[in-house]
Image: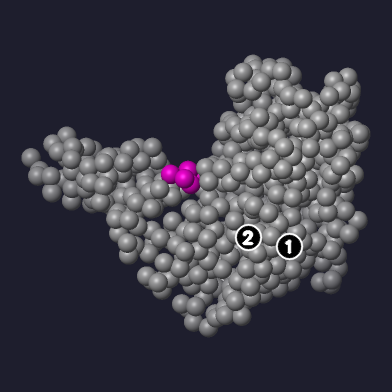
Amino acid sequence: MLKNDDLRKKAEVLAVRGQLQAAVQAYEKILKRDSSDTSAWIGMGLVFRQTGRIQEAQSCFTKAVQIDPGLARVHFHLGDLFREQGLFDAAERSFQEAVRTDPVDAQAYFQLGRMLNLQGRAEEAVAAYDKVLSLSDSIPEAYWNKLRTLPVIYDDEDQINLYRDRYADGLKVLSEGLSLDTAKDRLDALKGISTNSNFYLQYQGRNDKELQKQYGEIVHRIMAAVYPQWAAPLKPLPPVPNGKIRIGYASTFLRAHNGAVWLLGWLRGRDRENLEVYCYHTGTSTDAKTDEFKSCCDHFYHMPGDMEKACTQIAADKLHILVYPELGMDAFNVMMAGLRLAPVQCVGWGHPITSGLPTMDYWLSSDLMEPENGQEHYTETLVCLPNMAHCYSRAQHDRLQKQPPARKRADFKLRDDAVLYLCSQSLFKYLPKYDYLLPEIARQVPGAQFVFLAISSVHVVRRFMERLDNAFQSAGLRAQDYCTMLNRLPPDDYLALNQVADIFLDNPPWSGNNTTLVAVDCHLPVVTLPTEFMRGRHSYAIMNMLGITETIAGSEQEYVDIAVRLGNDKEWRREIVHKITDQHGRIYEDRSCVQALDEFYRGVVGKLSQARI
């Protein structure tokens, strides 16, 4: 019989060889003999993690730190597991334990900084990054993150101004200090842009074009230095022998994700005779929607997180046009888009902000969503497709009509007698200067109840509720009498919540698109106030498509007036519901945008082909 030490060595060898189930069995034998063997729990947890069995890995690591709370590296492993699951509060606690038990672990401080940042604790995140920099010079990401740290939500406009100025100063420091002379310089810079994008910058409600342009130039400089083979301008390609234009779509989110799932409408309705479509999924996660992407394209590649493999494949496919459905939600996409992998490169509207990248040629948008001066907001050439630029499937609506979710307000702990206003945007999309709108509505609608959905950070939720408390107190009211925060809901429960609500309140600075479409699927009246940028005009476009303009406000006061009237005038509310019921078909399966997109593709490739002659 092998001794425990020998079994442990055997398990480690098996794991290295990829014989993971055999490795688990070896660790289990050790634990049957001695359930307090922490190294066996750790080893088995690492194997489970390698095989994607996250919950079992978590159980093993938890057992190890219960036996010995001083295992700093195991706290780190737990934090990583929680981070990967989006459980940022739990991840932060684990990384706090890791640095408490090992105060010189720079990597633990770095991950702690990331979690604090995601929780909206910007100053604490900066302090953690400073600690990293004092302990190690081998984590350049800490320096980059420190200079780009932004809160998740803001207390007031002054705080937005403060962090915006600090962010602009940080970009200037990064740009002026950027050195790409040595291999180490280039690797450090690459690491610096790899940990996050400028995602939270866009939620300040300002024109981000110049800041995006500055960051886009930095990204391009780094990517061109690291991958010079994919940085030079490409010669226009002639049509292929079969006459088809090759179109590629690259994204980390070719799955059930708001950033790209809308793309399925473009793929289903395309001109199959003249367009050959390639899809490149660079994210790790897959689901049923990923399978739909596979079935809707001619060629599908899944290359999770592998920059060189993805770029090599795209270059080998000799595309005429490469489209990124969104840019800004994920660092990997932004980095790859900083290269020149096709003669024509476009950004879709999945994340409605200019990329700022000099390698992006066109920004594909909606003519109903863009203001007259829309081009001023983009570094790319703006291309406005008809209507919503979205071929929205009616499948969800039809499913709801056949088999509506059997839920009641009581299931969500909501009042049956309330006028229920649904406010279901992500909390970071709500700006403090609009908080006063809710107490203004509440003062005039007896029994008003505003329902929000929490995000994964308890700290952000608490800060948001404190902000609402202040707004309601200023109006002589108590937020707790009117505002309810629900936990995040599974898709079917979210649909049911829409069905038990009375009114959907769109968010002025960052309008709902998917949330508004779901509200319309559930025949819910939508109150919206279009604002300056495309990202504040999604619902405006949807309501115009429906031909229902009565609930589109022209001012903040009119927004309040419409919301109040819908709350108090049940007959008018029913009229709006009937209009949605009668006219909802206008927003589904609108192929005019797909036809216009196909024409744009043919036109731009035709121009390039002529230029080559």
For disc 1, the neighbor class at 10 Å (few under 14, some 14 to 19, many from 20) is: some
* Between 369 and 190, the one nearer to me in the picture: 369
What residue is drawn where x is 68% and y is 17%? 416
What residue is drawn where x is 84% and y is 63%? 376
Q: What's the amino acid at mark 2?
A: Asn
Question: Alpha carbon of mark 1 to alpha carbon of mark 2: how far?
Answer: 10 Å
Across and down, in percent, residue 434 comes to: 75, 46
Can you identify the residue that label 2 sits on? 198
Figure coloring: one colour
Is residue 426 visible to the viewer in this orientation of the structure? no
Q: Secondary structure at mark 2?
A: loop
What range is drawn magenta here?
84-90
**Which of the labelled discs sits on residue 139, or is there none?**
none
For disc 2, the neighbor class at 10 Å (few under 14, some 14 to 19, many from 20) is: many
Q: Quadrant of the C terminus?
A: bottom right
Across and down, in percent, residue 120 comes to: 56, 52
Can you identify the residue that label 1 sits on? 208
User: Relative to residue 594, is residue 231 drawn left or right?
Assistant: left
- Badge 1 vs badge 2, beta-carbon distance below 8 Å: yes
Residue most toward the left?
Answer: 1
Sooner in the amino-acid sequence: mark 1 or mark 2: 2
Q: Secondary structure at mark 1?
A: loop
User: Relative to residue 368, is residue 196 drawn left or right?
Assistant: left
Q: Report the number of discs.
A: 2
